[in-house]
Amino acid sequence: MDPIRQDATLLLDRLLSGARQVIVVGHTHPDGDALGSVGAMTAYLAEKRGLTVRGIFPDTPPETLRFLCREDFLYADAQREASLRFIGGSDLVILQDCNNFTRTEALAESLRASLATKILIDHHLNPDRDAFRLVFSTPDVSSASELLYWILLDLPDVAGDARNLPADCLASLMAGMTTDTNNFANSVFPSTLQMAGGLLAAGVDRDGILDQLYHNYRENRVRGMGYFQNEALHITGQGVAYMIATRSVIERFDLREGETEGLVNVPLSIGKVRLSLFLKEDKGFFRVSIRSKRGTSAQQLAVRYFHGGGHENASGGRLFFPEDIPSPEEAAAYIEQVSSAFLNE
Ligand code: 5GP
Ligand code: MN
């Protein structure tokens, strides 16, 4: 069940033992898995290994996920100098929940240039193996948090017993896995349920985590969701559902970062829908979320038409204007055209 190679964990143990200052890096627009897995690793390295460690992200997480943020996190958008200084002084870089440095955006250049030993812990396809000394990569787990759980259990000081991990570490792992599986709705493997059982047995307060994740939104989110499903949901004859959150709608409902999270999944509950896209307007581009049912590849659509990638049934990317479409108003026509071409292939 344990998806980790023993020799890889032994090398990880050796690299950690030789390290002094460590940086654990997550991707831009951090989600629950990025924050959870980075938080878990940071808690382990600080509390069990006594290392000087920081979790670093290119940008500040949304309010909705702030409960997963540790005091030792740095955000490059608000703390650029401190972030670059910490990278410069680190002898170990651990990248988690993304498969290359490109998704660390403003940090990518200094991370690539760093002479520190580099480790990757990720569950996406196509890892950039050449950029790392040690790679833990498998798409056959729910999340980076799950992969990290199995790695940590294999380390000598944890010795297969989750109770040897700090409480913060365990809670972060549970939160990261829960968000990436959409609370056990997708990407659930036998190892995922084993992990969940291990975390519960070790005392994690799962109900408390669920309250933070799913029962703590502002009213605006629910009202905005109602609008999108009523007024802004389009479904093509081929079963492609899409919703476009323009700036004016975002302002009308005062939707903050993170408050449209999960909306892209809703249309998949309709039998005839096989692909769902949610577009959110930003400066000069739309952020694109894509979900698909079995037999249709969200990942391929993201790679081919939205400069993105991700997992087979859950991917994302961007749609730029005026580069990809002349103006934001053309987004609907673009989606209809490329999804039709994609499904007719
Ligand atoms: P979400 O729709 O929740 O933002 O993202 C779903 C998944 O798509 C993420 O877990 C990530 O794997 C992938 N993803 C999202 N945005 C991008 C992007 O801009 N580039 C790439 N390569 N993958 C993305
Ligand atoms: Mn993930």
Image: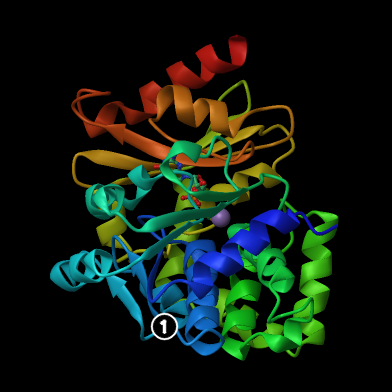
Q: Residue at x 61, y 44 (%)?
A: 267
Amino acid type shown at disc 1: Arg
Camera-side residue of 134 and 35: 134
Q: Residues within 10 Å of mark 1 (few under 14, many from 20)?
A: some
Q: Quadrant of ligand 2?
A: bottom right
Q: Residue at x 18, y 72 (%)?
A: 79
Quarter of the image for the N terminus: give it.
bottom right
Judging by the rendered image, the residue that carries numbered circle 1 is 70
Up the image or down, 182 lies above or below 52; here it is above
Up the image or down, 121 lies above or below 314; here it is below
- Locate residue 122, reporting x and y percent: 56, 52
Tell me if residue 181 can be seen. Answer: no
- Locate residue 131, reporting x and y percent: 41, 42
Tell me if residue 11 can be seen. Answer: yes
Q: Residue furthest left?
A: 81
Left/right placement of residue 183 relative to residue 15 reads right
Camera-side residue of 11 and 106: 11
- Label 1 element class: loop
- Locate residue 332, reporting x and y percent: 38, 28
Q: Residue at x 33, y 52 (%)?
A: 104
Camera-side residue of 282 and 14: 14
Quarter of the image for the C terminus: give it.
top right
Up the image or down, 25 lies above or below 109; here it is below
Q: Quadrant of residue 295?
A: top right
Up the image or down, 45 lies above or below 280; here it is below
Q: Quadrant of residue 271?
A: top right
Q: Residue at x 60, y 69 (%)?
A: 13
Camera-side residue of 79 and 219: 79
